[in-house]
Image (cartoon, helix red, strand yellow):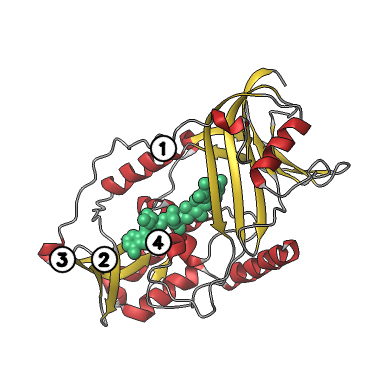
Amino acid sequence: MGSLRKLVIKTRRLSLIPRNPIVEEINNNGCVKVMSSRSALLEFVPETNKENLDVELPIFDPSKGTVVDLAVVGSGLAVSQLVSQAAMDLLDCLYTTWSGAVVYINEQKKKHLDRPYGRVNRKQLKSKMLLKCISNGVKFHQAEVIKFIHEESKSMLICNDGATVQATVLLDATGFSRCLVQYEKPYNPGYQVAYGILAEVEEHPFDVEKMVFMDWRDSHFANNDIKERMETRLRHLGIKVTSIEEDEHCVIPMGGPLPVLPQRVVGIGGTAGMVYPLTGYMVARTLAAAPIVADAIVRCLDPGRNLVGNKLSAEVWRDLWSIERRRQREFFCFGMDIFL
Ligand SMILES: Cc1cc2nc3c(=O)[nH]c(=O)nc-3n(C[C@H](O)[C@H](O)[C@H](O)COP(=O)(O)OP(=O)(O)OC[C@H]3O[C@@H](n4cnc5c(N)ncnc54)[C@H](O)[C@@H]3O)c2cc1C
């Protein structure tokens, strides 16, 4: 607890529609990140500055008509994890780590979580994964997929630039657009709405060794506006912001139904129901699942196994969503239903 510190504070809420604040979260390191809205405080928020990565992508040439082993649609978080594959040392992609976390249940009670947490350096993580993809021979094509057609042993992706990409396995990594993967039930997940800032503050009351994962203490709140709540919380905790480095808004669909299991198109990340229903987190789960999916695809593509089409993808889905995993997810969804 010193002077002039940076904090990451994030105020979150869960709801069936993107309203009704319920959950608040604060993360701290040598800094504070806060989530809130329109106010004098937020005049500190700097203009968004999009940074380009210093990575040259090898381009795929669809005019050659090559049938590739695997075509992945989407280039978000999940796919970089999948195609970079292999156990990677990602510790240098973390800005900060905490050996444990704390959850404030109410004004009297708190709970310690005895597991480590880290704050990801997005640029470093993405660059590292892209470089790994490139060294693994991945080629890129920039276009929107508008249609797909399955034949027995291959599938075709039709893109909005007129190109067709042919592949033995199609993997949908289009996040919440869920471009290729089919669902049996209507897609109606709960949402997490959050606003946060990374700010420099005069002082703060947190133990810098522990990440504040959730803070349910809400007696000081008089309204439901998420940004105003962030400001109220800062005032309540006696935190004075001196400057803001960046801010972040998000509306993240939470659990929702699983896709049809199995199906011809394989999925990973948001399309494959891998978001943790209660927290909206997906990074850690996808990092753990990517090698499982990649190994299954490599195993199924072995020419000796002679697997194609639905049989091939069924085996990959089985590895991704084992019975144990599905049971565990049902339990997580039950937890989310209670919160909502
Ligand atoms: C502000 C914010 C903060 C977050 N914080 C956290 C956090 O702290 N921890 C955590 O675990 N999660 C966090 N999340 C959630 C996490 O970012 C998402 O769950 C994750 O990005 C989903 O990854 P994905 O690869 O499945 O999809 P995305 O990252 O959404 O990528 C989908 C890709 O598919 C492409 N695409 C879509 N449709 C098509 C098409 N038809 N043709 C071609 N390409 C297409 C898109 O352009 C995109 O590149 C946060 C989200 C936001 C917005």
Q: Tell me which amino acid carries mark 4.
A: Thr
- Percent across and percent down for residue 310 are 37, 80
In front: label 1 or label 3 = 1
In front: label 3 or label 4 = 4
Residue 66: give its label: 3
**First in sequence: mark 1 vs mark 3:** 3
Residue 174: give its label: 4
Marks 3 and 2 in Cβ contact (< 8 Å): no
The CB of the residue at mark 4 lies under 8 Å from ligand 1:
yes
Is residue 116 visible in this depiction of the protein? no
In which quadrant of this rendering is ligand 1 seen? bottom left
Structural distance between the alpha carbons of marks 3 and 4: 23 Å
Q: Quadrant of residue 251 in the image?
A: bottom right
Structural distance between the alpha carbons of marks 3 and 2: 10 Å
Q: Quadrant of the N terminus?
A: top right
The CB of the residue at mark 1 lies under 8 Å from ligand 1:
no
Marks 4 and 1 in Cβ contact (< 8 Å): no
Residue of label 2: 69
